[in-house]
Amino acid sequence: MKKYFSAIIVASLGLLFGACKKDYKLNSNIQPVSKLSAPVDDKYIKLQPATSASVSFEWEQARAEDGSLVLYEVVFDKETGDFTDPIATIASDGGGVQNKLSLSHKELNSIAGKAGIAALATGKLKWSVKAAKGFNIKLATETRTIEVERPNGFAEIPVDVYLTGAATEVGTDLSKAIKLKSTAAGVFEIYTSLKNGTYQFVDRNTGTPATYYIDGTILKEDGESTQADGTKQYRLRLDFNNTAATVTEITAIGLWFAPENKILYDLPYAGNSTWSFQNQVITFHQESWGRDERYKFRMDVKAADGTAGQEWYGSSNADNNRPTAATPLSFWELKPVPNNDQYNYSFKFMSEVDTKACDVNVYFSPDKNYTHEVIVK
């Protein structure tokens, strides 16, 4: 019996090795997708990228000659394109296995932007399906178009935004571009100085970044802005959600001394988003109940249309105690004050400040919370 089984094993191995010597040829022949099913040709879609809305692209299956698995990709191009260089190629659902693709309005909005369809504009995208078996890839025999209306805002909102250019404090070296502060989803701002020259915003400080520029009150792609009014300080606010830009000139920042209801000292711009004065004596105001040390900051501003105004920055608390060496740094953080009330939301100086020469620095630095410091000399 053992000899019988041994003979079978030897014979089986001989057949196996004999089979291995034969050349195995992969059959990659396929028939392309012959019909697209959905959406219907020229379907109109009003894109709502902020929602969970999606569009289902569907097609009949392609056929492999050997009956094996076929993979799919949906390709998108401009209305006049021929898919030789598509603007987007996306694997179908199930990792490319299923003959359908669920695509969110957010993704379609991005594709529409790449096709050159502007915000608030309507345009057409051509789409089709590629079927693949090994290295054999075939485009469907049918193509369709969809007509999309884009909402306001950019199709792709950058994660980071930087300021660069000859007009800026750091010049044209991209690696030194100044990073803006993110204040909300898609909203960025910077307090800075601009001199005559050009400047632009970029989404990274290496390689070949996407570029943006301000045109009046509109934020646009692929260009640069020009500063031609001499050196001035500004707050630049960019809202990528609705392509809006706000340019506010900062004409002055002053230390508001509440008990005397006036600006005690102006703070000239010192560069790098900082306003400062040095070696100025600060004397508390004598009241019948004691010495008053309350203060905050007034910012004089001018809108792009020339309208002048004032903004107030003070404490997050309506009233405060005098700080000490143990007071947390958050005490000195600057918050917009809702009105120009003489006393409320004021800071208080430390006791050591009274009658001493001091430096005061106000920081609107984009890399931290806006704050200030008082240094007793």
Image: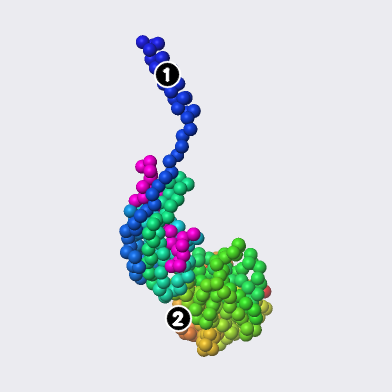
Q: Is residue 329 left or right of residue 195?
A: left
- Point out which mark residue 54 bears: none
Q: Is residue 97 visible?
A: no
- Tell me what residue is drawn at x 39 percent, y 72 percent: 149
- Provide the secondary structure element on which disc 2 rests: loop
**Residue at point 38% right, 59% down?**
142
What residue is rendered at 41% in x and 69% in y? 124
Q: Is residue 192 left or right of residue 238?
A: right
Image quadrant where one finds the N terminus: top left
- Report the quarter where the C terminus lies: bottom right
Residue 50 figure quarter: bottom left
On the image, numbered disc 2 is attached to which residue? 338
Give the alpha-carbon distance from disc 2 to disc 1, as whole Å: 93 Å
Q: Quadrant of residue 373?
A: bottom right
* Amino acid under disc 1: Ala
Q: Secondary structure at mark 1?
A: helix
Badge number at residue 11: 1
Magenta segment: 61-84
Residues at badges 2 and 1 in contact (C-beta under 8 Å)?
A: no
92 within the magenta span:
no
Left or right of residue 376, residue 91 in this image = left
Q: Position of residue 133 (x, y in %)?
A: 43, 46
Between 87 and 158, which is closer to the camera in this rendering? Answer: 87
Graded by Cα atoms within 10 Å as few (under 14), some (14 to 19) or many (20 or more), the crowding at tag 1 reads few
Where residue 304 appears, x then y in whole percent?
53, 85
Looking at the rendered structure, the kind of residue marked 2 is Pro
